[in-house]
Amino acid sequence: MWFKLRVVRLVLPLLAFAAHEPAIAETPAGTFRDWRKGAIDHAQRMRKFLDFRHKAERTPSVVFKYRFDRNPSGVIETYQPGGPTLTARNAFFADLGTNGRTCFSCHQPQDGWSVSAASAKARFEASSGFDPLFRRVDGATCPTAPVATLDDRRKAYKLLIEKGLIRIGLPLPRAQDLQFEVSAVDDPYKCTTNRDTGLTSPTEGIVSVYRRPLPSTNLGFNASIMWDGREPTLESQAVDATLIHAEADAAPDAFRQAQMVGFEKGLYTAQIFDIRARRLDEGTVTGGPAILPLLQSSFYVGINDPLGRNPTGAPFDPAIFDLYEAWAENPRKDREAQHRRSVARGEQVFNNGFCGFCHNTPNVGGHSFDTLLNIGTADAKDLPGLDIGGLPVLTLTCTKGDLAGRVFKVTDPGRALITGQCADIGAFKVPGLRGLAARAPYFHNGSASTLAEVVEFYDQQFALELTQEQKDDLVNFLASL
Ligand code: HEC
Ligand code: HEC
């Protein structure tokens, strides 16, 4: 009975949320490709802001079949069922552009194939800011920022060092698609406000947003690609990343594209060891990446959809994870057993119905349908638990469509920067949740520096009324994914 009451309390705010339909952006990913030319031209024009090229990317010679890396709460494993990768023979690790960057510059195994803020900072300090991660095109708050002295560089790469954020310069959609104008910009870096790097009018030019690198692993579970779903395929993504982040003269050929995509698709990553729970794949619990290839073979778009869009007609199951069930009943009293019970309880809190409405892909926690969602993380206001300090604020005034007259203040328009639709403002991809412990900070704009902050945000934003024990359990569970 107690458990049932709790379910009701968790589901209620969600129903209120679901009734608020415009928050669910239903535009399929990849339909709009107009952004592409503007974004690539912009990155190429930024080549006039010259970099110093002192340090080459440090790359391991082999990514082994089983690779283990430490992180603050334990060890993360990357598993390649297809066998080891010799990096000299794969374009993912090749310098294909003009600024020394490779895909590996921003997608590394110890960071869950993203870049954690802690690693960005360590790479800055170790290289005095010359590591290829720090390139003016999109590592800096704006390519115009001076980088001559160490102090200049510390300032220019501030958002990357502190929050692991990369600048994404995207053009406003063309006039016939655009339902809003950018009526004001509060930009500490003067990137969107400068005609050379930003907007030329409230309805034309480049908007700079600052986003976390999404993990280039567990990609077989993706229903959409990029935070705003703008890429239709991993191949197109690899081409555009080479032309933009690496400022390449030419697109990689089909052979290199296939190497990059083949490598990424062969990676499976998850936490395998936790300092307090110890091995996460012991006995009948199934943490770690070993089960992921099997899960992927049964994955399809819509596999566990709460809005009745599963192509097989199967009903939605809110119990998204069953990795740590077996730890719930452990009677032992030592600290390891206590922590394991906490992880198991955290899994139950997650499975109560609220989280799984959006994070619904079984045992992965991504969104199984290719729609993006707005949970308010881009709103430029005091958000519980979150820190949006240092991010520019855009005021978007809707001039057409159902929301004409509405004004939105956001740090990132999200999907709306691709579709031009006011209903898509603030909508983002729901990322998969495996390997979280390695890739702090969280959310597209790095606004949650810890998993505890993520949980605090959800608790207050959606009035979940979780107890302190439930919050701690949820954090312990998320850190074990
Ligand atoms: C300068 C850093 C940087 C470099 C270099 C880089 N990426 Fe990324 N990557 C990002 C960022 C930031 C995002 C998210 C951007 C967004 O969604 O707007 C991303 C997103 C991705 C995604 C999307 C994952 C998902 O789940 O949607 C893939 C795949 C990816 N990158 C692969 C690559 C490949 C392949 C290369 C090399 C050609 C590459 N990246 C080079 C920073 C980088
Ligand atoms: C209404 C949909 C929705 C619900 C419900 C929801 N999430 Fe999310 N979640 C998202 C979206 C969308 C994002 C990406 C938002 C962003 O990056 O700004 C996200 C991001 C996250 C992230 C950060 C991942 C990363 O790589 O940065 C975590 C962790 C997370 N959610 C956990 C949870 C937990 C735990 C719950 C339940 C308490 C929950 N979510 C409920 C939609 C949802």
Image: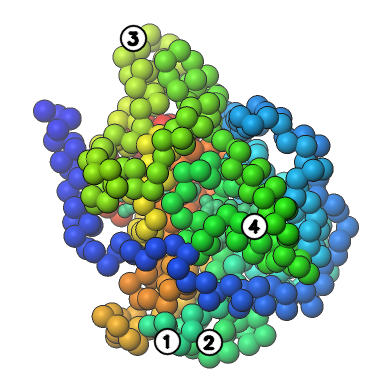
Left or right of 111? Residue 61 is right
Cα distance between the residues tagged 4 and 3 = 50 Å
Q: Label 3 CB, ligand 2: below 8 Å?
A: no
Cα distance between the residues tagged 1 and 4 = 29 Å
Residue highlighted by disc 4? 238
Q: CB of mark 1 within 8 Å of CB of mark 4? A: no
User: Regarding mark 4 in the picture, which secondary structure is present there?
Assistant: helix
Q: Label 2 CB, ligand 1: below 8 Å?
A: no
| Label whose residue precedes the other's in the sequence (1 or 2) | 1
Q: Label 4 CB, ligand 1: below 8 Å?
A: yes
- The number of numbered badges drawn on the structure is 4
| Label whose residue precedes the other's in the sequence (2 or 4) | 2
Question: Closer to the observer: label 2 or label 4?
Answer: 4
Question: Closer to the observer: label 3 or label 2?
Answer: 2
Q: Going 60% across and 59% down the picture, which residue do you hit?
A: 237
Q: CB of mark 1 within 8 Å of CB of mark 3? A: no
The mark found on residue 176 in the picture is 1
Q: Quadrant of residue 359?
A: top left
Residue 130 location (% of width, % of height): 81, 57
Quadrant showing the N terminus:
top left
Cα distance between the residues tagged 1 and 2 = 12 Å
